[in-house]
Image (cartoon, rainbow, N blue to C red):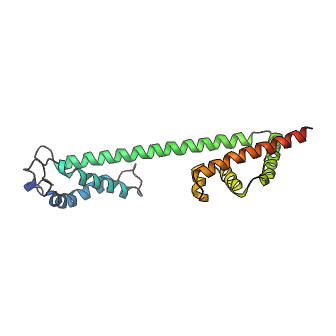
Amino acid sequence: MAQSLEHTSDTKTVSTASRNALLDQILPIVEPIIKQRLNHYVINANDREDVYQDIMLKMIKMADRFQLDQSTPLEHYVNKMIKSVKCDYVRRKVAQQKRQQLLINEYIVDYRTRRTRNPLERQLELQELQQLFSHLGALSQIERNVVECLLNDYKPREIAAQTALSDKTVYNAIQRSKLKLQKSMKNYISERDA
């Protein structure tokens, strides 16, 4: 590698004008080195191309800073970039796995708590939900659509985007729905207890 870069090794820094020529000369040399070093068990085969592209982009951005003299070979810079991008990749993967594990644990806890409830409690919950749905008739069409979206775990901004309403209209519909449903449920409970 040092033999192919002999005529550029006597310059400490590369001028901007000769940057493209240097890149044309360096990239074919470093490409096989990078691909060889990416054959690592930690990097998923599907992600290797993305990691390779990240390294190449970093090489292009940092080409001005290369000091190609005898004391610092080009391979040193390539190894540093490969190590940096690999570490970034591993950090992202570990964070993603932690998030996935947290979601799985949350689902498991939710599933177990739902499963261990008393059947009588579940029956009462279902009756209350049925009663709640029967009171949805008191709502306007927009309010019903907003409540359905809320029950499907949509956030107000997502509801606004989905229903082509403004954020303010969605928030107002949520507030009106709450008030109407509370009033309707209070009337139902007072009639039931009377």
Place of residue 147 in the rendered image (x, y in percent of width and height, measured from the top left): 69, 51
Quarter of the C terminus within the rendering: top right
Residue 68 lies, with reference to residue 26, above or below; the image says above
| x then y, percent, for residue 170 | 63, 51
> In the picture, which quadrant includes the N terminus?
bottom left
Q: Name which quarter of the figure residue 192 lies in.
A: top right
Which one is nearer the viewer's eye here, 192 or 43? 192
* Horizontal relation, residue 48 to residue 80: left or right: right
The answer to whether 147 is drawn above or below residue 118 in the figure is below
58 or 189, which is in the foreground?
189
Image-based side of 66 in relation to 115, left or right? left
Visible in this render: residue 122? Answer: no
Horizontal and vertical percent for residue 50? 37, 56
Q: Is residue 187 visible?
A: yes
Image quadrant where residue 162 sits: bottom right
Residue 162's place in the image compared with 92, above or below, is below
* Furthest-right residue in this view: 194
Q: How many marks?
A: 0
Query: In the image, what residue occupies the spot 30% across and 45% down?
Result: 83
Residues 17 and 147: in front is 147
Residue 47 percent location from the top left of the image? 40, 55
